[in-house]
Image: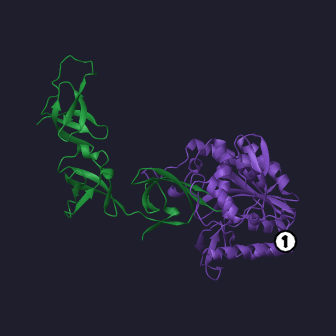
Amino acid sequence: MATYSTNQFKGGLKLMLDGEPYSIVENEFVKPGKGQAFNRVKLRNLKTGKVLDRTFKSGESVEAADVLETELQYLYSDGEFWYFMDMETFDQIAANKAAMGDADKWLKEQDICNVTLWNGEPLQVDAPAFVELKVTETDPGLRGDTSSGGSKPATVETGAVVRVPLFIEEGEVLRIDTRTAEYVSRVKE
Amino acid sequence: MTDEAWRPAASLETLYARSRLLDAVRGFFRERGVLEVETPMLSAAAATDPNLEPLVTCYDGPGAPPDGRMYLHTSPEFPMKRLLAAGSGAIWQMTRVFRGGERGVRHNPEFTMLEWYRPGWDHWALMDEVAALVHHVAGPQPVRFHTYAELFAPLGIDAHGDDTARLEAAADRLVVAPPQGLDREALLDLILSHCIAPNLGRGALDFVHDFPVAQAALARIRPVDPPVAERFECYLQGMEIANGFHELSDAGEQRRRFAADQDKRRDRGQSVLPMDENLLAALQAGLPDCAGVALGLDRLFMVALGAAHIDEVLAFPLERA
């Protein structure tokens, strides 16, 4: 079992606490002049995202979390799980809804995703920062209608809805920033 | 580390200011007629305090100790006391000291210590002089005095009387997710460093005195009820900047405390360090009644220059050294 001493603590280090994986957000070394030294640490739970404080006696060792970030190819979903493939080993890995977060609304088959694995299980799936998706449904644009700020909703092939300019028509392919869920541009076929 | 790591961490402007502050410290002691001394950084003996970890090095040239192991000093206290025993009178020095495992916003394992001794003075007179030095270097501010017990009382803690179980309960109540299995002294350290110290030295220079006897270190003990150690600490802006003692001069008692430190180090699985027989011999020969203090100059400079991180006042902190 790999462990880290408090002397190795720094932002981003992944630890196991009470059986859960955490990432160090902040680490402060505290020592009274002639007394016991402590590390006061803020940690983020990698499964729930919750942040907690904990104080360690300096010199203590803590179990390392076996966390790995890797790129996996999205295959398909059966509604309960989302299946990904390791492109080197062809191993299939299933992510649940909690790990998917918002990523599922942007994913098309064969997209490459950044996946955080803990003991081989997906903790978090990040959609590619930009995706290109076809518009499946939108109202015909009424040119000159600026009452809605010059934009209208459009549904894309994955089911997600984004605000798009009025001139966008069904069948067009859009470039979308998944981090902000915003339209970026049209993609010429 | 960036590709700019060759550059100093402190700005050149800060380094100029630091140089002026070093001059101010020298001027303070020159004016008071205190003798500046220099003592070895390298010794075959070490401070035995279980909460200090000296850096070890080796010397195998002529005159080497049998195992070649030598220690970088954690403070110049022992040789300075030998000078006092030899009749030096009041002495001061400014020197780099070294402490293993200490790195953070207020810690660099190599830092500048200002240490001085006043024969014939007690810790009360010395606290006044520490305040005068701080005023001289970092500007005037009000001065307050608290006993160690007075700081804990508002938290419902009897610092001298509460047993480990009561202190554990207090730590669970006051500190979020405290470490488990701490001994009595570590629990007091935890509560002091997390709940009390951050509020000290705000708008004033705060002195804490009359420490529990278990934290006497090298201070003499005053046999009142409960007995207290004639030790003090000085806080500025939530930081401990100085630690002083009405110095223990009893060689037998000093040897017993060193031996107790050794036992504690052994119990904790730390290396057992050679105690300084030269210091013990000097105490045996007679240390004049005196008070002494060690002050972390980098931290005082942080306050004087408005720095939030020790690296802002150091040319080359650890990672750039």
- The residue to which callout 1 is attached is B250
Looking at this view, name the residue that lies furthest to the bottom. B66
Residue type at the position of mark 1: Asp
Q: Which quadrant would residue B318 be assigned to in this image?
A: bottom right
Q: Which residue corresponds to the image point at 42% horizontal and 69% vertical from the top-left?
A: A2
Q: Determine if residue B321 is in view.
A: no
Q: Position of residue B311 (x, y in %)?
A: 56, 50
B184 or A129: nearer the viewer: B184
Q: Position of residue A28 (x, y in %)?
A: 55, 54
Q: Which residue corresponds to the image point at 62% horizontal and 41% vertical from the top-left?
A: B306
Q: Which residue corresponds to the image point at 17% horizontal and 51% vertical from the top-left?
A: A110
Q: Which residue corresponds to the image point at 50% horizontal and 55% vertical from the top-left?
A: B320
Chain under disc 1: B
Q: Determine if residue A3 is in view.
A: yes
Q: Which one of the lettered chains is coloured purple?
A: B
Say whether residue B118 is left or right of residue A145: right
Q: Position of residue A33 (x, y in %)?
A: 68, 58
Label 1 SS: loop
Say whether residue B93 is left or right of residue A110: right
Q: Position of residue B170 (x, y in %)?
A: 67, 57
Q: Which one of the lettered chains is coloured green?
A: A
Say whether residue B78 is left or right of residue A149: right
A33 or A43: nearer the viewer: A43
B85 or A7: nearer the viewer: A7
